[in-house]
Amino acid sequence: MANPGRRKSVPPQTIPDKSQKRVPDTPSYEAATKYETSRFRFSSEHIDLAVGPDHGCEWAWGPELSIWKDVLHYLADFSAKTWAEIEAERTGGRNRHRKHHSMDIVKLPSMAQARLLAHMGDDAPDSLFRFRLSGKGRLWGIRDGAIFHVLWYDPLHRVYPTDPN
């Protein structure tokens, strides 16, 4: 039977030795640069607002505030996914193809190439990434690791027009 007047012994607490700091495990270069398993993030650092007929482009952001709301809604949805999940998405038609993918700059029409060079100069990338937001709507930007830098909103599929057939 325990002695009611006696206290239980409490083991002494260990005080961490601050002189011996633990260095967190550093991921390998391959793991640190592998974007597929990273969550989507976005930036407006390179956004090009100077588009439209006045700037030699057939696409524009437009004056409607709803465009910004729609684009932010899509970006928020993408932010809940990894890049692998995003790149695995396919269209729902008979000829299912990737909804979101990279495209080499040299494949873009000259108007888009010229606008990109005017906007970014020597810092222009070799490829852009584009999201299919709707039947015609596209969001173009630069993927840098897991970060998508928004560049253009193309509501009418004018940056890279395709044959409707």
Image: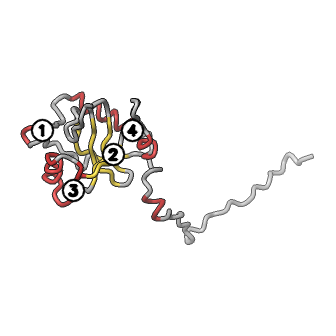
- In terms of image quadrants, where is residue 59? top left
Q: Residue at x 27, y 46 (%)?
A: 141
Q: CA distance from mark 3 to mark 2?
A: 18 Å
User: Mark 4 or mark 1, which is nearer to you?
Assistant: 4
Q: Judge from the rendering whether residue 36 lies leftward or rightward of residue 73; answer left or right.
A: right
Mark 2 highlights which residue?
42
Mark 1 highlights which residue?
52
The amino acid marked with disc number 1 is Gly
Disc nearer the start of the sequence (3/4): 4
Mark 3 highlights which residue?
124
Q: CA distance from mark 3 to mark 4?
A: 27 Å
Answer yes or no: do the residues labelled 1 and 3 have beta carbons within 8 Å?
Answer: no
User: Mark 2 or mark 1, which is nearer to you?
Assistant: 1
User: Mark 3 or mark 2, which is nearer to you?
Assistant: 3
Q: Position of residue 68 (x, y in %)?
A: 25, 33
- The furthest residue to the bottom: 19
